[in-house]
Amino acid sequence: MKALRNYLDKIKPNFEEGGKFHAFQSVFDGFETFLFVPSTTSKSGTHIHDAIDSKRIMSMVVIALVPALLFGMYNVGYQHFHATGATGSFIEMFAYGFLAVLPKIIVSYVVGLGIEFVVAQWKKEEIQEGFLVSGILIPMIVPVDCPLWILAVATAFSVIFAKEVFGGTGMNVFNVALITRAFLFFAYPTKMSGDAVWVSGDTIFGMGQAVDGLTVATPLGEAATTGAIPPFSWDMVTGVIPGSIGETSVIAIALGAILLLATGIASWKTMFSVFVGGAFMAWVFNTVGPDTPMAQMPWYEHLVLGGFCFGAVFMATDPVTSARTETGKYIFGFLIGVMAIVIRVLNPGYPEGMMLAILLMNIFAPLIDYCVVQGNISRREKRAIKSNN
């Protein structure tokens, strides 16, 4: 590492003002601060510093996403081999899924980071690191059959209009990855819903079997369209069911949740409240709801199906777009869980619900924090008046 540090110090003058590569100063700074913690400190005031900056936090979130991503790759291969009737080993299934998912990851990062590099250089600012997480989240929340050009358009739209126009990392109102999914859902609905998008029908480097028109429904989609409640099975927990690439395995998502909670990056209050809100609303519909499959689906099936777990762990806990007050986190998470189930049950044309629930609550997060803060101020004023009397 010392040799790398010395090499960076040697070439750094070329990227500073007046150097022959000064046009790429932001790019160099981004790579340097990713590899090494900056040594610059504040010159005035009282500040507390440690070695964990935003880049390290984002890197930890990416690590937490790895189990769900790896399982998602395997599940892509498993679903293909299972649906086509082909035979293959674990390695072959994983390799098929890896090769199917890798182009989506590359497109997401190339488009998103490319835009961030250009904007940073144009504004003469350092490259912001928020897309380290968004870049891996985006491929994980789309169907495996989503065309790459559509993914590129959606990624560009979300980075520009959901992030950069608000000022960049830390200033965005909406979760960038979810805006990508929302754009895809409303602009290209046939590529994000139905039975023909969840399982790849292509052959990749001779692996698998090419099949045109392959259709496989997700459990939620099947319940919404056929009117049959899917019986609970451990496949819903392990994740060997059709769905978005990284959202199917509860176990893999739980491993990421443990890491985020152990490191203090994610709020357990938000995460826990999402599950409580979802379970409560599902129980309400089970008790007094309409006689429809989605309303009568057991609460525990609602929690393990679709993107509920993934959204609760990795989306709702986004520190930028979620509530920041401690009491507000309970309210924010609970309402996300409630709204996700309400959308699932009352809107049969959109059986997922988690995406819209989180985006809706992103709007109200500042209001929730404002009400909590004002409530605390009012209570303190009343205590002060009582003590003075």
Image (tube, rainbow, N blue to C red):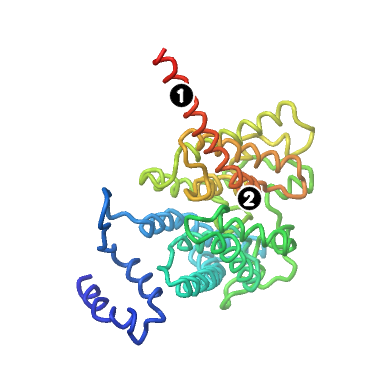
Relative to residue 312, is residue 33 depicted above or below? Answer: below
**Where is residue 202 shown, x and y percent of the image?**
65, 72
Residue corresponding to mark 2: 355
Q: Tell whether 2 sits left or right of 234.
A: left
Dot 1: few (<14), some (14–19), or many (≥20) neighbours within 10 Å?
few
Residue at x 38% of width, y 77% of height: 25
As helix, strand or loop, the secondary structure at mark 1 comes to helix
As helix, strand or loop, the secondary structure at mark 2 comes to helix
Dot 2: few (<14), some (14–19), or many (≥20) neighbours within 10 Å?
many
Marker disc for residue 381? 1
Quarter occupied by the C terminus = top left
Of circles 2 and 1, which is in front?
A: 1
Relative to residue 352, is residue 110 depicted above or below? Answer: below
Residue at x 71% of width, y 26% of height: 287
Give the residue type that dot 2 points to.
Met
- In the orientation shown, which residue stands out farthest toward the top? 389
Relative to residue 108, is residue 137 depicted above or below? Answer: above
Q: CA distance from mark 2 to mark 1?
A: 39 Å
